[in-house]
Each structure stands twice: as structure tokens, then as C-alpha cells.
Image (cartoon, grey):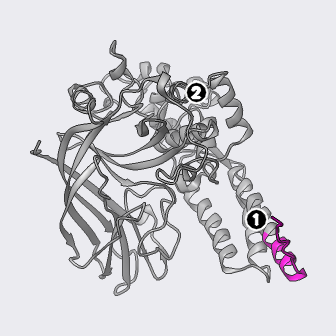
Amino acid sequence: MLGLRVSVGPAQAQARAADEAAARELDAIVALIDAGRFEDARARIDAASQQPGADERERAALAFQRERMRRIRLDFGLDRAQAEQKVRAQIPDLTREEFDAWDRQGLLESMTIDGDKRYFNRAPSNLFRLSAQALARRRADAKPLGAGPMETLNDHQREVRDAALERGYGAPRRVRVVQSLTVKADAVPAGKTLRAWLPYPRELPHQQEDLRFLASAPAAHKIAPASALQRTVYFEQPARAGQATTFEVSYELTVFGQYRRIDPDKVAPAPDNGDTRDHLGDHLGERPPHIVFTPALREFSRKVVGDEKNPYRIAQKLYAAVDAIPWAGAREYSTISNISDYALRAGHADCGQQTLLLMALLRLNGIPARWQSGWVYGDDGYTNMHDWAWLYLAPYGWLPVDVTTGRFDSPDPQLAGFYLGGLDAYRVAYNDDYGRGFVPAKRFDRSETVDSQRGEVEWEGGNLYFDQWDYDYKAQVLATKQ
């Protein structure tokens, strides 16, 4: 069969060349910002924005890079004296030499912006998660480092394993959620309409079911269709002078734990025919900017995987390698140009960063992987945002994987490796992908460009960033019908 040759006219070629030049210029600006050369980046943003051929999409991308610099400055708000003072609050007899040594080791995250060294706001507290020496020097009456109830092996994981061995899911929990977003007083002029989006769960068979909407404030709302991969409930409300503006939603749902027992010898490579039932082709390969098969990623994969060919054993190796990266509080995701690469290089990562790194490594090795995220909770009122993933292993299908919770110290291999193929029932999923659009669409750039957990809000003048509003999330575990 003969193919058709499509000719490209001079005007099309010129437009394509212009688009490629604009993309190269944007990449150069991103690299300047990542290198801390903000003044140079601003100059190039100004020049590129004034180009007569720049379209609205290109100008918006340039404007976001300007906003990204502002967000980075918010994240890196400490100078040397302030960072040292915060560490000294936990180590009263801290010496300058100790601080310098930890700084040289990269244990205090910093960024030099136009020649001025700035420390990440959470670097002083992260230090005690990254350095056993610093932790040992911490004052005896310091508040213990926080951890969620499912971060240690307990009876619930055993309950899930035992209940799910036959059918893959079980040990349900019924939970009532109340989530709110409160815009600070006078953040926008009185009378202007605020548009807000709060996360809202999808019903997922055998994972979370029997979703029941309870109430909202304001009462008028729009729930996005179940097909929305980052599902939300949408509100509008006018701002009032001198008053905060609150948006709130409440609902109940039943969440099931997950567990599958895997026989490595039965695992086969994923079908290479773009399996349409499980959409495997959508979850393989690169997805810039956060899943890119960089030379560093390829080299890391080669060292970890070696000559292994079995997909499950490859997944086990990659899981262990990413699990070995220490957890630490994270920069805002919108400030990072490639999250999987950042997690590989930074020496620490939070749950979403570890998850994107593992997804990139799995996909590089031909194992389909997809994102999921939401909130975790406990019987005692504990709540926290959390991200995890699912991987595909034939013939078992899609299996959950929580690399941040990682492996447990247990003589029972099923429990030790519970979170590679298992999930607890103390989590609500709101996002079945990352970086997807809202319904109705958001007009301006989001505060969180990757995830959707805290909510989003804007008005006709633009997006409202996290420094202009607060959020709250409460989860109450109810009696569950078995």
C-alpha cells in the first residue's frame, strides 16, 4: 500500500520553525531558573513575551515561569542565619562547624538565587530525617518526628491480607470526610466572584464504593463527572469586605483494602499490543516534564536492575531502590521542572516525588505504571496528603504500590512486602492521574500543577496561591457494614 506524501508549504514550515524556536527558548528559561539565574531568566521572559509572533499559549507559559520564580522564593525563605537559628532551636549547643558539615553534605536543601544562598523553609526540620548524627544531637524534649498509623506494621495490614487473599480486596472502612478551603479576608476586592474547586472522590469498584454526598457550603455546587481523572466539586461565592470566604463539602464512602499474592514465576511481560481494556499504552513511555528517561535515570536503572528479566523481580528491585531514598518534606511541586529527576538527584524525596521516580523507572523497563493520590487517615483523627501508584503485571492485572510506606521488618514475606501489591483501607483516592484538567476548567494556572488534594481557587484577576488561603481536612471512621 502506497503512503501519501503530505507537502508542507512555506507558511507551515515557518510556523513550525517558530514553534520550535519558542520551545527552545522556554527550555532555556526553565534551565536558567533551575540554575538560580533569575535576573537572566526575567530578561529573556521579557524579550520573548514582546516578540510579535508570540501567541497566547506561549505568553502564558512564559508568565508561569515568572510565577514559578516567585513561588521558589516563597519556598526558599531562609537566609543562613535563619536556617542556623532553626536548627539551634533543636540543638542548643550547635556549632558553626556542625552546620557547615551538614550543609556541605547536602543535608540542608538550599538554592543560590542570583548569588544569594537561600535555604528551603523545611530544610532545618528535614535535617533530622536525613542525618542520624543530627537526630542524635536533638534535645531530649523535642517533639517526636511525625509518622502515620499505617507506616508501621499493624493488625489492619494483616486483616487486609487475610481478607483479600481470595478476591483481592476486603477489610472495608466507612469514612465521613469534611474538607474546606478558606480564602483570607480581602485577598480579592469585595464583590468579586471567587471560583473554588475541592477534591471529590470517584467510585472505583472494589476500592472505594457507596459514595454519598452529604452537604456543601455554599449549597450550590457542581460535581465533576466520574470520568474526570482529577475529580472535584466546584463552587462560586462573592468575596465580602473584611471577611474570610469558606468553601466546604462533606460526604461518606466505603474504602476497601487491597492485596494480591504474586507468584513471580507466573508473571509475564506486559502485552505489547496496546491492550485496550486496561489502557496499557497510556501508562508506558515518557510523559514530560516529570517522566523523562534521562541519561541519569537510565544509568540508575541499569545499576539496579542488572540482567533481571522477570517483571515482578524488576519491580521488587526498583521498589527497594526508591524506598531507600529518605523521606523529607517537599518543595511545592509546581516549582520543580522534572520531579522524577529531582527525586533521583536531591538525596531525599516525599511520597509524590518517590512515586513519580518509581513510575518513570517502571515504564523505562516496560512495566505499565499509573498515578493515584489522595488523603490518608486514622481512627484517631490523623489525616495527611499522600501519593502512591499502580503497576501492571500480567496475568494479575493492575496492582497497588506504595513505595513511600515501603517494606516492613517482618519474618512474614507477605507482610514485609505488603505495599508492593497491597494497600490499607485508610486512604481516599481523589486522583487517578496527575496534572489533568478540572471540570469545569480552571482559567488560570493552578497552585498545585501536579496533584489535587488541598483544592484550588481563583478570581477574574488570576489564581490565588497557597499563601492567600488555608485548607482543612477531617476524616471520621464510622461503623462499617461487612
Which disc is residue 237 wearing? Answer: none
**Image position of 226 with respect to 147: above or below:** below
Magenta extent: 1-19
Estimate the x, y position of residue 8 in percent, counting from the top left.
Answer: 86, 76
User: Is 24 situated left or right of 191 in this image?
Assistant: right
Crowd rating for badge 2 (residues with CA inside 10 Å; few <14, some 14–19, many 20+): some
Crowd rating for badge 1 (residues with CA inside 10 Å; few <14, some 14–19, many 20+): some
Q: What residue type is labelled 1?
A: Ala
Sequence-wise, which precedes: disc 1 or disc 2?
Answer: 1
Q: Which amino acid does label 2 sit on?
A: Trp
Instruction: Tell me whether circle 1 and circle 2 mark residues in contact (CB < 8 Å).
Output: no
In terms of secondary structure, where does tag 1 sit? helix
Estimate the x, y position of residue 141 in percent, counting from the top left.
Answer: 29, 25
Which residue is under mark 1?
23
Work out whether residue 432 or residue 18 is closer to the camera in this orientation and state it.
Answer: 432
Which residue is under mark 2?
102
User: Is 65 situated left or right of 393 in this image?
Assistant: right
**Image position of 183 with respect to 318: above or below:** below
Residue extending farthest to the bottom is 191
In terms of secondary structure, where does tag 2 sit? helix
